[in-house]
Amino acid sequence: MSIFEYNGSAVVAMVGKNCFAIASDRRLGVQLQTIATDFQRIFKIHDKLFIALSGLATDAQTLYQRLVFRHKLYQLREERDMKPETFASLVSALLYEKRFGPYFCQPVIAGLGDGDKPFICTMDCLGAKELAKDFVVSGTASESLYGACEAMFKPDMEPEELFETISQALQSSVDRDCLSGWGGHVYVVTPTEVTERILKGRMD
């Protein structure tokens, strides 16, 4: 079993009309044994920028702490919040710094940039960015997430429809992966508000 699959994870981010949604499962396991069913993978950097970290849970928490530290330094120096594109470059540089002993994480970054244009990207554990206009996925359930998102996604969805789409995609994908699941955690972010919802899923 790969170290990336050790704790299990499913993460997806999707773009709508001037909004985005980011979702993850809630299971923390050690291989096939479930340890917790309320594990947090999605972290808020500021009101319009979120990062989800799939992969090894301990590395995800360490990496998040380092990113918060870097972002706070940026806020003090620049007196503004970081743009999603800038933050993606920061994460990429931070991961590449440790390329010979990497953080075993695959981040998914989602945010609203200039003119409330949604930005999503993912990267591997060495910081190689993959930008997308529609959706990005990560984690042990990524194969089934690709299929579900490919089938369900349509451009310019309103926030409510976007929530429904990403939730259905997540739930149907984690049912096909035994290392992730146990409910879901969804954030829908618009220029004016952030909506957080917890999904109940199959408890097996």
Image (cartoon, helix red, strand yellow):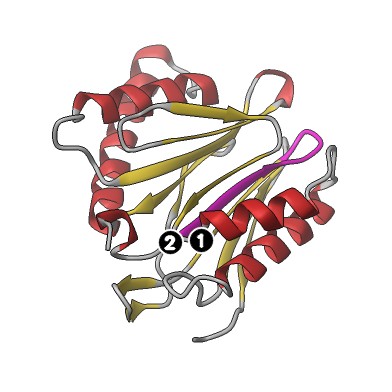
Q: Residue at x 67, y 44 (%)?
A: 14
Residue in view at x 29 percent, y 73 percent: 31
Q: Badge 2: few (under 14), some or many (20 or more) residues near its Cα, within 10 Å?
A: many
Confirm whether residue 57 shows in the render.
yes
Q: Under tag 2, what secondary structure?
A: loop
Q: Quadrant of residue 64?
A: top left
Q: Which residues are magenta?
A: 9-19
Residue 189: x %, y % from top left: 67, 44
- Give the labeled residue for mark 2: 9
Residue in the picture at 61% in, 56% down = 145
Residue at the outermost top position: 78
Q: Amino acid at mark 1?
A: Ala
What amino acid is found at the position of numbered circle 2 in the picture?
Answer: Ser
Residue 84 highlighted magenta (yes or no): no
Front residue of 29/111: it is 29
Q: Are marks 1 and 2 in contact (CB under 8 Å)?
A: yes
Toward the bottom, the furthest residue is 204
The residue pinned by badge 1 equals 141
Is residue 17 on the magenta stretch?
yes
User: Is 190 in front, or is 192?
Assistant: 190
Asked if 56 appears above or below 67 in the picture, the reply is: below
